[in-house]
Amino acid sequence: MSTGNLTINLKGIAQNWSNLDRMSAENVETAAVVKANGYGLDCGRVARSLYPAGVRDFFVAAAEEASAIRRELGDNVTIYVFSG
């Protein structure tokens, strides 16, 4: 069976968010969506890499993902859960 390796550039993810945030209209808040456990990358880890880029609002699909982000970043962020 073949195997493969996937390398994820978390700094690149943060840079992409920064670029999109800069392109947003003035007086518009931007957020990061890290549902599906950060699209399989570990939502806490992805959130931790986005925080220094300025992300303070996160959207997730499930409460468990919100909990993981809260453990990583504490009360310094707002987390919205799609599933209520």
Image (tube, grey):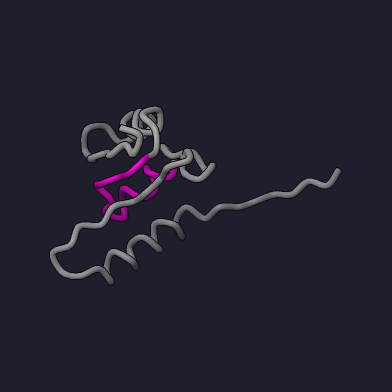
Q: Position of residue 3 (x, y in %)?
A: 78, 46
Residue farthest to the front?
A: 83
Q: Most extreme residue toward the right, as rendered?
A: 1
Q: Is residue 72 magenta?
A: no
x, y percent for residue 58: 30, 44
Q: State which quarter of the image contains the C terminus.
A: top left
**75 and 29: which one is in front?**
29
What is the quadrant of residue 14 in the picture?
bottom left
Residue under the point 50% across and 45% down: 39
Residue 82, image quadrant: top left
Task: Describe residue 1's horizontal placement relative to residue 44 as left or right.
Answer: right
Expressed as whole percent of the image width and height from the top left, the position of residue 65 reads 40, 33
Residue 81 against residue 39 in the figure, above or below: above
Residue stretch in magenta: 46-60
Q: Residue at x 23, y 40 (%)?
A: 78
Relative to 51, say whether 66 is above or below. above
Please say whether residue 57 is one of the residues in the magenta stretch.
yes
Residue at the (33%, 66%) spot, across then down:
20
Quarter of the figure with the N terminus: top right
**20 sits left or right of 41 in the view:** left
**Residue at (37% x, 40% y) in the render:** 60
Work out whether residue 40 or residue 74 is closer to the camera in this orientation and state it: 40
Q: Left or right: 84 with respect to 12?
A: left
Label tally: 0
User: Residue 37 at what x, y percent from top left?
Assistant: 47, 38
Q: Is residue 80 above or below residue 8?
A: above
